[in-house]
Amino acid sequence: MNLCGVDDCNTAQVAKGMCGKHYARFKRYGDVHKVHKPGLKRGEHRQETVGYAGAHARVRAKRGRASEHLCECGSQAQDWSYTHTDPDDIETLWADHKGVSKLVRYSMNVEAYEPLCKACHVSKDKTRMSSV
């Protein structure tokens, strides 16, 4: 049995080298040590800056699910996609659902995201990556 990779945690690994508790924190807040303390209202935030997953969670909290919106092509959106328009955006390494790390950019500005269908999201990401 492999143990969680977080210091001083002796719980079995569940995903990406972490136990369920630490993986959930990482996925939600971008930080395995962040602990949710109840008391904030929807859309309010304890920290000015959060990780990639936390930024996307803020977009969902403020603007709803992407699937509640239409993509620019007219089909139902599936993802919130960062528009790369924020001069104060953040660049970090992010492990995708397959555990592959890649460099991603994101913003703390919830208005710097647009709802896109998968096809438009992939197309725009390819265009953005080729211009970097």
Image (cartoon, rainbow, N blue to C red):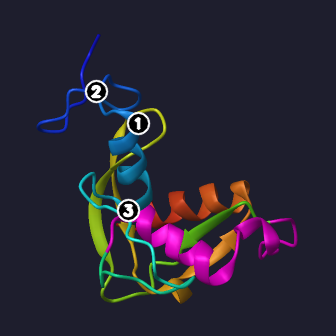
Is residue 34 covered in magenta? no
At x 47% / y 67%, what residue is drawn?
Answer: 128
Q: State whether residue 1 is above or below residue 125.
A: above
Marks 2 and 3, the one that precedes in the sequence: 2
Q: Which residues are magenta?
A: 50-76
Residue 72 shown in magenta: yes
Q: Nearer the viewer, residue 10 or 70?
A: 10
Residue 121: percent from the left, percent from the top?
63, 61
Q: Which residue is mark 1?
A: 20
Residue at 66% from the left image edge and 82% from the top image edge: 63
Q: Is residue 6 above or below residue 74?
A: above
| Residue at figure coordinates x 87%, y 66% from the top left | 75
Residue at 34%, 82% (x, y): give it: 46
The residues bearing labels 2 and 3 have C-alpha atoms spaced at a distance of 20 Å
Residue 82: percent from the left, percent from the top?
A: 51, 73
The residue that label 3 is drawn on is: 29
Q: Which mark is residue 11?
A: 2
Disc 3, SS: helix
Q: Earlier in the sequence, mark 1 or mark 2?
A: 2
Give the amino acid at mark 2.
Thr
Indicate the amino acid at tag 3.
Tyr
